Amino acid sequence: MKVVRFVNLLLAGVLVGNEFGGWVAVHPALATLPIREHVAAERAVTKRYKAIMPYVMTATIASGLLVLGRLARRRSTGQRWQLAGTSCFGAMLAVTLLGNMPINHRILAAVPEALPADWYALRARWDRLHTVRNVLNVTGFGCLILSTLAGDAAGDTAAATRP
């Protein structure tokens, strides 16, 4: 149980740190660039994240579900926090797939010489959705931490060592 919880917390921490850094530093900095450089930078960042983040997001949720599976027979505070945290990450993935990803596809297709007429509205919508994702991620991570703390107090460590 300790290894599964550790992996879940590690993945969630990587996900939250990455998304939070993009929210407070990367994307605001890119928005200050002249449009030509802004579009090129957004495309480069989007391509890079596209290669990494789907795996981190799904692995975070999958490892959260594994923890939930191990807590399935218990009706504990730790289980409820784990469910809440994993649900937050699931909701974040839904926002990503239904909101951010369609915009990402448009960003990848954009060229500075022929920007879509709604480029600035598109970026504003992406930023709002990214804010929602960050709220879900930070909330989810907090819930996973509370689950781990509650689980240790409830004796999950002893249960994990039983044959």
Image (cartoon, grey):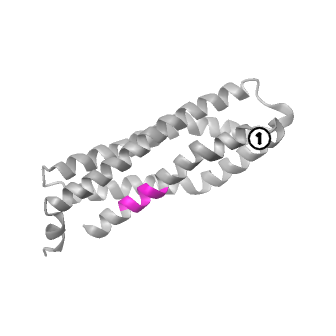
**Quadrant of the frame with the C terminus:** bottom left
Left or right: where 127 falls relative to 139: right
Q: Residue at x 81, y 43 (%)?
A: 37
Q: Residue at x 63, y 29 (%)?
A: 124
Q: Residue at x 21, y 46 (%)?
A: 80
Residue type at the position of mark 1: His
Q: Say above or below: 40 vs 60.
A: above
**Quadrant of the frame with the N terminus:** bottom left
Residue 118 lies in the magenta stretch: no
User: Which residue corresponds to mark 1?
Assistant: 38
* x then y, percent, for residue 69: 23, 56
Question: Could you say which is closer to the camera, residue 146 or residue 51?
Answer: 146
Q: Residue at x 52, y 52 (%)?
A: 54
* x then y, percent, for residue 102: 60, 36
Question: Could you say which is closer to the camera, residue 114 or residue 40?
Answer: 40
* x then y, percent, for residue 78: 20, 52
Magenta region: which residues?
A: 8-14
For label 1, the SS is helix
* x then y, percent, for residue 44: 72, 50
